[in-house]
Image (cartoon, rainbow, N blue to C red):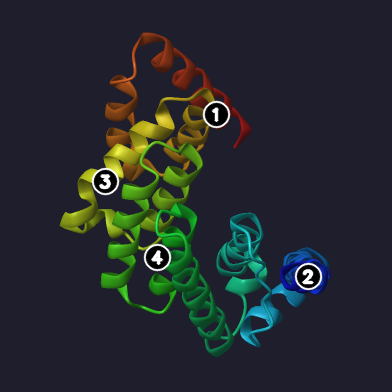
Amino acid sequence: MLFSRHTEFAVPGLCAFLLVVGLYASWVEGRAFFVTPTSDADRFSALVERHGVAGLSVFSTRYLLQDCDAALTGAYGRLQPEERRSAAATACRDIAAEAVERTPMDGLAHTTGARASAVLGDMRAAVTSLLRSAGATPHEMWQAQRRLLVMREWALDEEPALAEQFRRDMAVVAATREGRHWLARWYVGAPERRDLIASVVDGQGEFAKRDFLNAVRAASAAQ
Protein backbone atom coordinates (compact mmCIF):
# COMPACT_ATOMS: atom_id res chain seq x y z
CA MET A 1 0.00 0.00 0.00
CA LEU A 2 2.86 2.37 0.90
CA PHE A 3 4.61 1.49 -2.36
CA SER A 4 1.42 2.26 -4.31
CA ARG A 5 1.06 5.70 -2.69
CA HIS A 6 4.70 6.54 -3.53
CA THR A 7 4.20 5.37 -7.07
CA GLU A 8 1.06 7.48 -7.37
CA PHE A 9 3.13 10.63 -6.79
CA ALA A 10 6.35 9.48 -8.45
CA VAL A 11 4.96 8.70 -11.91
CA PRO A 12 3.37 12.13 -12.53
CA GLY A 13 6.52 13.79 -11.14
CA LEU A 14 8.74 11.78 -13.46
CA CYS A 15 6.53 12.61 -16.43
CA ALA A 16 6.67 16.30 -15.58
CA PHE A 17 10.44 16.15 -15.24
CA LEU A 18 10.82 14.42 -18.62
CA LEU A 19 8.52 16.99 -20.20
CA VAL A 20 10.63 19.87 -18.87
CA VAL A 21 13.85 18.18 -20.07
CA GLY A 22 12.30 17.57 -23.48
CA LEU A 23 11.14 21.17 -23.82
CA TYR A 24 14.55 22.46 -22.79
CA ALA A 25 16.34 20.19 -25.27
CA SER A 26 13.96 21.30 -28.03
CA TRP A 27 14.59 24.95 -27.21
CA VAL A 28 18.38 24.54 -27.15
CA GLU A 29 18.37 22.62 -30.43
CA GLY A 30 15.81 24.85 -32.14
CA ARG A 31 17.53 28.14 -31.36
CA ALA A 32 20.55 27.01 -33.39
CA PHE A 33 18.34 27.41 -36.45
CA PHE A 34 15.90 30.15 -35.47
CA VAL A 35 18.29 32.50 -33.63
CA THR A 36 21.22 32.23 -36.06
CA PRO A 37 21.56 35.42 -38.17
CA THR A 38 21.08 35.09 -41.91
CA SER A 39 23.28 37.75 -43.52
CA ASP A 40 27.06 37.48 -43.88
CA ALA A 41 27.57 40.60 -41.79
CA ASP A 42 25.29 39.41 -38.98
CA ARG A 43 26.82 35.92 -38.91
CA PHE A 44 30.31 37.39 -38.75
CA SER A 45 29.34 39.77 -35.96
CA ALA A 46 27.69 36.92 -34.03
CA LEU A 47 30.98 35.03 -34.07
CA VAL A 48 33.05 38.07 -33.07
CA GLU A 49 30.66 38.87 -30.22
CA ARG A 50 30.43 35.21 -29.18
CA HIS A 51 26.71 35.06 -29.89
CA GLY A 52 26.97 31.99 -32.11
CA VAL A 53 24.48 29.34 -31.02
CA ALA A 54 25.13 25.59 -31.09
CA GLY A 55 22.46 23.05 -30.29
CA LEU A 56 22.78 19.63 -28.72
CA SER A 57 23.02 17.56 -31.89
CA VAL A 58 25.92 17.02 -34.27
CA PHE A 59 23.78 18.50 -37.04
CA SER A 60 23.23 21.85 -35.31
CA THR A 61 26.89 22.03 -34.30
CA ARG A 62 27.83 21.46 -37.94
CA TYR A 63 25.57 24.36 -38.87
CA LEU A 64 27.66 26.65 -36.66
CA LEU A 65 30.93 25.21 -37.98
CA GLN A 66 29.76 25.99 -41.52
CA ASP A 67 29.08 29.57 -40.40
CA CYS A 68 32.69 29.68 -39.25
CA ASP A 69 33.92 28.36 -42.56
CA ALA A 70 31.89 30.95 -44.46
CA ALA A 71 33.09 33.76 -42.18
CA LEU A 72 36.75 32.89 -42.70
CA THR A 73 36.61 32.16 -46.43
CA GLY A 74 33.91 34.50 -47.73
CA ALA A 75 34.53 37.91 -49.27
CA TYR A 76 32.89 39.74 -46.35
CA GLY A 77 35.14 38.10 -43.77
CA ARG A 78 38.31 38.59 -45.80
CA LEU A 79 37.61 42.31 -46.11
CA GLN A 80 37.28 42.83 -42.37
CA PRO A 81 40.01 44.60 -40.36
CA GLU A 82 42.64 42.22 -39.01
CA GLU A 83 41.43 42.68 -35.43
CA ARG A 84 37.87 41.59 -36.25
CA ARG A 85 39.05 38.77 -38.49
CA SER A 86 41.31 37.49 -35.72
CA ALA A 87 38.43 37.71 -33.23
CA ALA A 88 36.23 35.63 -35.53
CA ALA A 89 39.02 33.09 -36.06
CA THR A 90 39.57 32.80 -32.30
CA ALA A 91 35.86 32.18 -31.76
CA CYS A 92 35.83 29.58 -34.53
CA ARG A 93 38.88 27.83 -33.11
CA ASP A 94 37.10 27.60 -29.73
CA ILE A 95 33.88 26.37 -31.34
CA ALA A 96 35.82 23.72 -33.24
CA ALA A 97 37.66 22.62 -30.09
CA GLU A 98 34.37 22.25 -28.23
CA ALA A 99 32.90 20.24 -31.12
CA VAL A 100 35.94 17.95 -31.16
CA GLU A 101 35.64 17.42 -27.42
CA ARG A 102 32.04 16.29 -27.92
CA THR A 103 32.69 14.30 -31.12
CA PRO A 104 36.40 13.49 -31.56
CA MET A 105 35.87 12.01 -35.05
CA ASP A 106 34.17 15.11 -36.47
CA GLY A 107 36.30 15.84 -39.52
CA LEU A 108 34.60 19.17 -40.20
CA ALA A 109 35.43 20.39 -36.69
CA HIS A 110 39.09 19.49 -37.16
CA THR A 111 39.22 21.22 -40.55
CA THR A 112 37.48 24.32 -39.22
CA GLY A 113 39.97 24.39 -36.36
CA ALA A 114 42.81 24.10 -38.88
CA ARG A 115 41.58 27.06 -40.91
CA ALA A 116 41.03 29.17 -37.79
CA SER A 117 44.52 28.34 -36.53
CA ALA A 118 46.02 29.26 -39.91
CA VAL A 119 44.23 32.62 -39.91
CA LEU A 120 45.72 33.22 -36.46
CA GLY A 121 49.17 32.28 -37.71
CA ASP A 122 49.48 29.07 -35.69
CA MET A 123 50.61 26.75 -38.49
CA ARG A 124 51.69 23.96 -36.17
CA ALA A 125 48.16 23.70 -34.78
CA ALA A 126 46.76 23.92 -38.32
CA VAL A 127 48.91 20.99 -39.47
CA THR A 128 47.88 18.92 -36.44
CA SER A 129 44.18 19.61 -37.04
CA LEU A 130 44.43 18.75 -40.74
CA LEU A 131 46.05 15.41 -39.96
CA ARG A 132 43.34 14.66 -37.39
CA SER A 133 40.67 15.58 -39.93
CA ALA A 134 42.25 13.19 -42.43
CA GLY A 135 42.31 10.46 -39.80
CA ALA A 136 38.63 11.01 -39.00
CA THR A 137 37.34 11.35 -42.58
CA PRO A 138 39.95 9.91 -44.97
CA HIS A 139 37.56 9.05 -47.81
CA GLU A 140 34.95 11.86 -47.76
CA MET A 141 35.41 13.97 -50.88
CA TRP A 142 33.95 17.19 -49.48
CA GLN A 143 36.23 16.96 -46.45
CA ALA A 144 39.23 16.25 -48.66
CA GLN A 145 38.33 19.34 -50.69
CA ARG A 146 38.22 21.49 -47.56
CA ARG A 147 41.60 20.21 -46.44
CA LEU A 148 43.08 20.88 -49.87
CA LEU A 149 41.78 24.44 -49.80
CA VAL A 150 43.37 25.10 -46.42
CA MET A 151 46.66 23.54 -47.48
CA ARG A 152 46.61 25.45 -50.76
CA GLU A 153 45.89 28.86 -49.25
CA TRP A 154 48.68 28.66 -46.68
CA ALA A 155 51.08 26.46 -48.72
CA LEU A 156 50.85 23.83 -45.99
CA ASP A 157 51.40 21.06 -48.53
CA GLU A 158 55.05 22.11 -48.38
CA GLU A 159 55.14 20.96 -44.77
CA PRO A 160 56.80 17.51 -44.66
CA ALA A 161 54.02 16.17 -42.44
CA LEU A 162 51.35 17.11 -45.01
CA ALA A 163 53.01 16.54 -48.39
CA GLU A 164 51.73 12.96 -48.73
CA GLN A 165 48.33 13.85 -47.25
CA PHE A 166 47.94 16.55 -49.89
CA ARG A 167 48.37 13.93 -52.59
CA ARG A 168 46.04 11.45 -50.87
CA ASP A 169 43.29 14.05 -50.55
CA MET A 170 43.73 14.96 -54.19
CA ALA A 171 43.30 11.29 -55.12
CA VAL A 172 40.08 11.10 -53.08
CA VAL A 173 38.73 14.11 -54.97
CA ALA A 174 39.89 12.76 -58.36
CA ALA A 175 37.96 9.52 -57.80
CA THR A 176 34.60 11.20 -58.51
CA ARG A 177 33.30 13.08 -61.54
CA GLU A 178 32.40 16.13 -59.47
CA GLY A 179 35.85 16.08 -57.89
CA ARG A 180 37.65 15.77 -61.24
CA HIS A 181 35.79 18.79 -62.59
CA TRP A 182 36.73 20.71 -59.45
CA LEU A 183 40.37 19.72 -59.96
CA ALA A 184 40.14 20.73 -63.62
CA ARG A 185 39.25 24.29 -62.63
CA TRP A 186 42.14 24.28 -60.19
CA TYR A 187 44.44 22.89 -62.92
CA VAL A 188 43.54 25.73 -65.28
CA GLY A 189 43.97 28.41 -62.64
CA ALA A 190 47.14 27.13 -60.97
CA PRO A 191 49.90 26.31 -63.48
CA GLU A 192 52.32 25.46 -60.67
CA ARG A 193 50.06 22.57 -59.60
CA ARG A 194 49.47 21.04 -63.03
CA ASP A 195 52.11 18.32 -62.90
CA LEU A 196 50.91 17.09 -59.53
CA ILE A 197 47.22 17.18 -60.45
CA ALA A 198 47.90 15.39 -63.74
CA SER A 199 49.94 12.67 -62.03
CA VAL A 200 47.16 12.04 -59.51
CA VAL A 201 44.47 11.85 -62.20
CA ASP A 202 46.67 9.49 -64.24
CA GLY A 203 46.35 7.00 -61.42
CA GLN A 204 42.56 6.95 -61.69
CA GLY A 205 42.27 5.05 -64.99
CA GLU A 206 41.51 5.88 -68.62
CA PHE A 207 37.89 6.93 -68.14
CA ALA A 208 38.85 9.34 -65.37
CA LYS A 209 41.64 10.81 -67.50
CA ARG A 210 39.30 11.42 -70.46
CA ASP A 211 36.70 12.97 -68.19
CA PHE A 212 39.33 15.20 -66.60
CA LEU A 213 40.70 16.35 -69.98
CA ASN A 214 37.19 17.24 -71.16
CA ALA A 215 36.65 19.22 -67.96
CA VAL A 216 39.98 21.03 -68.46
CA ARG A 217 38.98 22.01 -72.00
CA ALA A 218 35.62 23.29 -70.75
CA ALA A 219 37.26 25.25 -67.90
CA SER A 220 39.82 26.73 -70.29
CA ALA A 221 37.13 27.81 -72.73
CA ALA A 222 35.16 29.46 -69.93
CA GLN A 223 38.04 31.75 -68.99
| Separation (CA) of disc 4 from disc 1 | 24 Å
Q: Which circle marks residue 114 in the picture?
A: 4
The residue type indicated by label 2 comes to Arg
Q: Position of residue 128 (x, y in %)?
A: 28, 64
The residue type indicated by label 1 comes to Glu
Q: Is residue 89 left or right of residue 154?
A: right
Q: Which circle marks residue 31 in the picture?
A: 2
Q: Secondary structure at mark 3?
A: helix
Q: Is residue 40 left or right of residue 136?
A: right
Q: Is residue 174 left or right of residue 33?
A: left
The residue type indicated by label 3 comes to Gln
Q: Which one is closest to the eye, mark 2 or mark 1?
A: 2
> Circle 3 is placed at which residue position?
165
> Against 179, is 161 above or below?
below
Tell me the quarter of the image containing the C terminus.
top right
Task: Tell me the crowding category of disc 1: few under 14, some 14 to 19, or many 20 or more residues within 10 angstroms, Cα based.
Answer: some
- Check if mark 2's residue and mark 1's residue have beta carbons within 8 Å: no
> Which comes sooner in the sequence, label 4 or label 3?
4
Task: Tell me the crowding category of disc 3: few under 14, some 14 to 19, or many 20 or more residues within 10 angstroms, Cα based.
Answer: many
> Which comes sooner in the sequence, label 1 or label 3?
3
> Which comes sooner in the sequence, label 3 or label 2?
2
Q: How many marks?
A: 4
| Separation (CA) of disc 3 from disc 2 | 37 Å
Q: Position of residue 220 (x, y in %)?
A: 54, 30
